[in-house]
Amino acid sequence: MAESINAAIIERLEKVVNTLQENSMKMGQLLAVHDEKLNTQDQIDAVLFEKVESLHREVTRKTDEIKTGCERDIRKVDDRLRAMEKKMWSIFGALSIISFVVSPVGQKLFKNVLTTDRNAGTISMTSLSADAILRPAVRKSPVS
């Protein structure tokens, strides 16, 4: 009887060992599948990270191009505004001068400056003789 109990225990231990071996093999296979999936995922991640980096470089390059273009356009607009501002101030100055000349104060000032004494330009008829009025002036030529 002791032998039959020992044989039953040994048989049972053998079943447990076989079951453990099967479970160990299944766990090894499962770990191999998971390891393969992890390796595949690492490769996919590497490709994705490279694509993200490539996209980042492209976006940065395009951003720099846009920034350069905007700065160039801003400089052009600034130059045009400066030219327009110069023209505007020139026109404003000219209009200021014209409005001053046309104003009553300007008319009075320019009337005194531009006109001379009225009597200085008139010829008195009493001082000239009738002969001088009728006869043209005879001049001597400097060449004899």
Image (cartoon, helix red, strand yellow):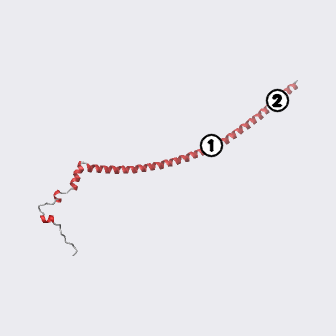
Query: Which of the marked residues, 2 or 1, is nearer the chain's N terminus?
Result: 2
The image's mark for residue 15 is 2
From the viewer's perspective, tell me whether residue 124 is left or right of residue 109: left
Quarter of the image where one finds residue 117: bottom left
Percent x, y of residue 45 = 65, 41
From the viewer's perspective, tell me whether residue 8 is left or right of residue 89: right
Q: Name the foreground residue: 8 vs 116.
A: 116
* Residue farthest to the top, as pictured: 1
- Residue plotted at (87% across, 25% down): 4
| 141 over 60 or under it: above or below | below
> Which residue is disc 1 drawn over?
49
Q: Name which residue type carries label 1.
A: Phe
Image quarter in which the C terminus is found: bottom left
Quarter of the image where one finds residue 119: bottom left
- Residue plotted at (79% across, 33% down): 22
Q: Name which residue type carries label 2.
A: Lys
Q: Residues within 10 Å of mark 2 (few under 14, many from 20)?
A: few
Q: Name the foreground residue: 99 vs 29.
A: 99
Percent x, y of residue 136 = 17, 66
Percent x, y of residue 55 = 59, 44
Could you say whether the residue bearing mark 2 is in a helix, strand or loop?
helix
Q: Name the foreground residue: 33 vs 141.
A: 141
| 129 over 17 or under it: above or below | below
| 137 over 68 or under it: above or below | below
Percent x, y of residue 122 = 16, 59
- Residue plotted at (23% across, 51% down): 107
| 142 over 98 or under it: above or below | below
